[in-house]
Image: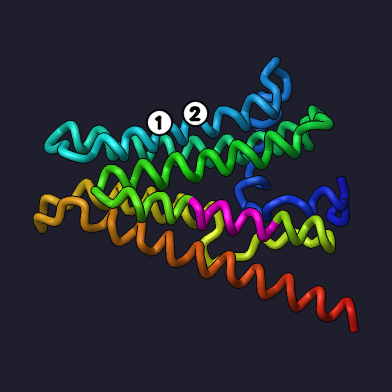
Amino acid sequence: MSDGDPVDADRRPLASRDTGWARAVARWLATTPITPNAISMGSVLFAGVAGLAFAALDGASGGARIGLLLLATLGCQLRLLCNLFDGMVAIEGGKRTADGAVWNELPDRLADVAVLVGLGVGIGEPALGWAAGALAVFGAYVRELGHGIDGVVDFGGPLAKPQRMALVSGAAVLSLLEGLWNGQGGLLLIALWLVAAGTLLTGGLRTLSLIRRLKRSGE
């Protein structure tokens, strides 16, 4: 596949896709009966685990809280790995299917909502969690809207999916140390507010970029 292949232009640019370990895992997965669509659905499973772990933080303390934070972090990272490998197995592994685009997009939207709503519930801010989840869907909608209108896939940030999950995962890991300053839940609340604000900004910037492209094409 050449660098100029249109399939590449439609894929989120990920440095991890070009690493040796990722290529080795993708090659192995391609030799198994596991399909790219199944991997995409796996991302929802792991996001659900992360969301449930976050939600269970409400009232948890001590070792239970530490375990839930670690489980949530693991779920978020495994969700991202599924997002990496579904495309690699489909395209580099030659297992692409006609309905692959559906399974590539819809599970991601469910996964975003599961993680962010779960986080909101766990810190006592369910409305903020739902708002962040809705804004994540909004940003993805604008990206796909632009793709449908002028063929451009805008993966721009500042808080696209990888950055959202990195922020949430980082806050969860740092929250393991909250006992040092008696700030239980504070970092996760800040992270969720940042996700909501950053995702709103991301969707807004993508919208403005789409409008500018359309205006230029009409001149």
Instruction: Tell me if 18 is positioned left or right of 126 in this view.
Output: right
Decide if residue 152 is in sight here.
yes
- Circle 1 SS class: helix
Q: Disc 2 on helix, strand or loop?
A: helix
Q: Is residue 21 visible?
A: no
In the rendered view of the protein, which quadrant contains the C terminus?
bottom right
Compared to residue 29, the image places residue 74 above or below, namely: below
In reply to whether residue 78 is colored magenta, the answer given is: no
The residue sitting at the top extreme is 33
Residue labelled with disc 1: 49
From the viewer's perspective, is residue 145 above or below residue 79?
below
Mark 1: amino acid: Val
Q: Position of residue 147 (x, y in %)?
A: 78, 57
Measuring from the top left, give residue 21's x and y in whole percent.
60, 37
Residue at label 2? 45
Find residue 43 and report its horizontal and vertical position in percent.
54, 33
Q: What is the span of residues highlighted in magenta in the rendered image?
A: 134-143
Residue 172 shown left or right of residue 213 in the figure:
left
Find out whether residue 141 is within the magenta segment.
yes
In which image quadrant can residue 34 be found? Answer: top right
15 and 211: which is toward the camera = 211
Instruction: Give me the residue at 68% from left, 34% from top.
Output: 103
Image coordinates of residue 176 in percent, x first then y, are 22, 46
Is the Cβ of the residue at disc 2 closer than 8 Å to that at disc 1?
A: yes
Q: Which amino acid type corresponds to the residue marked 2 in the rendered image? A: Leu
Rate crowding at label 1 as few (under 14), some (14 to 19) or many (20 or more) other CA atoms within 10 Å.
many
Q: Residues within 10 Å of mark 2 (few under 14, many from 20)?
A: some
Residue at horizontal 84 percent and vertical 54 percent from the top: 3
Q: Where is residue 69, by image quadrant?
A: top left
Q: How are the residues colored? A: rainbow
Q: Is residue 64 left or right of residue 79?
A: left
